[in-house]
Amino acid sequence: MRFAIPLGIFVLMVGLLGYGLTLDPKKVPSPLIGKPAPAFSLAKLHQPDSQLSRDDLLGQVWVLNVWASWCVSCRAEHEVITRLSKESPVKIIGLDYKDEPDDGRRWLNQFGNPYSASLIDLDGRVGIDWGVYGVPETFIIGKDGLIKYKHIGPVTHEALDTDVIPMLKELRG
Amino acid sequence: MRFLLICLMFLPSVSMAAIEAYEFKDEQMEQDYQQLTEELRCLVCQNQNLAGSDADLAQDLRRQTHEMLMKGNSPDQVVEYMVERYGDFVLYRPQFKTSTLLLWLGPFLLAILVLWLLIRRLHSQQEVAQPDQSSMQRAKDLLSDKRDSS
């Protein structure tokens, strides 16, 4: 009985610390979820003369995938994004983040292009506006122009099946 | 020759100190900039602030901070901009609000709780140490050998 309180505190601390080990400190919850998608107007990677802006996409469900040719895990993610483009009719917009347009185009030529359009964010300003801090990142934007979901790091096949595709179905209604 | 070598020793520290050369409108703005980059966390290298990090993102966020100050934004507006995008996590000194209440007050609550437990414990020990009137009398009788001779 004498040891009940210290033992209780010990068990509580072990429990809390153990829970702490299962968390990933790299995953910072995004405050942008539920907020309007930040505005942008950027040149398209394959038609640098023409621009695409946030408001052009208003009223439809779309996916923003932040990638770059220098990003190693984007290569791993590429086949998942390709699968998404085949299984879902929503527009996938790529944000070529802090990348040379030539390198970006070569990357898409080499691996295939799952994007409806890719946009050039040469100096990363739009990335900052979207709170991007680790490429790749993936956002889902609803018909109302609000951000519904954010995935940090490469989207896996599992995440696609459990989160992304069901959410896109629900949002398209 | 030796002097030259000694000079060389100081070279790396000099070259590392040169990051960006930003111009400011006045001294106040420069101070604001310094303070902001001290207090904002670099999201990539999570245990460094913007001022201390050479990561790409930290450079971009320093540029963003500088631009916003030059456009006439107040330091609070810069902080608000960062928090809207990266969450409270970017702040090394989180704001005082409902979601951070426990963070700010937790240590004090814990200290009060421990103090209260300590005082209660000391009290109960004192009570045990103080014998009541009748047993005191009995002890006195025993010591002065006034026992009933039975």
Image: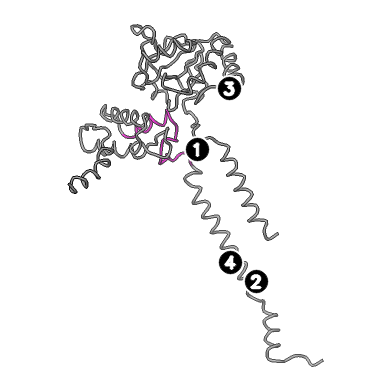
Please tell me which of labels 2 and 4 falls first in the chain: 4
State whether discs 1 and 3 lie on one chain: no
Disc assigned to residue A159: 3
Extent of the magenta region? B75-100
Residues under labels 2 and 3: Cα distance? 63 Å
Pick the quarter of the image with the C terminus of chain A. Answer: top right
Residue B137, above or below B108? below
Q: Position of residue A116 (x, y in %)?
A: 47, 8
Residue drawn at the location 39% of the way across and 17% of the way down? A39
Residues under labels 1 and 2: Cα distance? 44 Å
Residue drawn at the location 71% of the way across and 87% of the way down? B142
Q: Residues within 10 Å of mark 1 (few under 14, many from 20)?
A: few
Instruction: Indicate the colouring scheme.
Output: one colour
The residue tagged 4 is B122
Please tell me which of labels 1 and 4 falls first in the chain: 1
The residue tagged 2 is B128
Q: Amino acid at mark 2?
A: Val
Residues under labels 3 and 4: Cα distance? 56 Å
Q: Residue furthest front?
A: B1
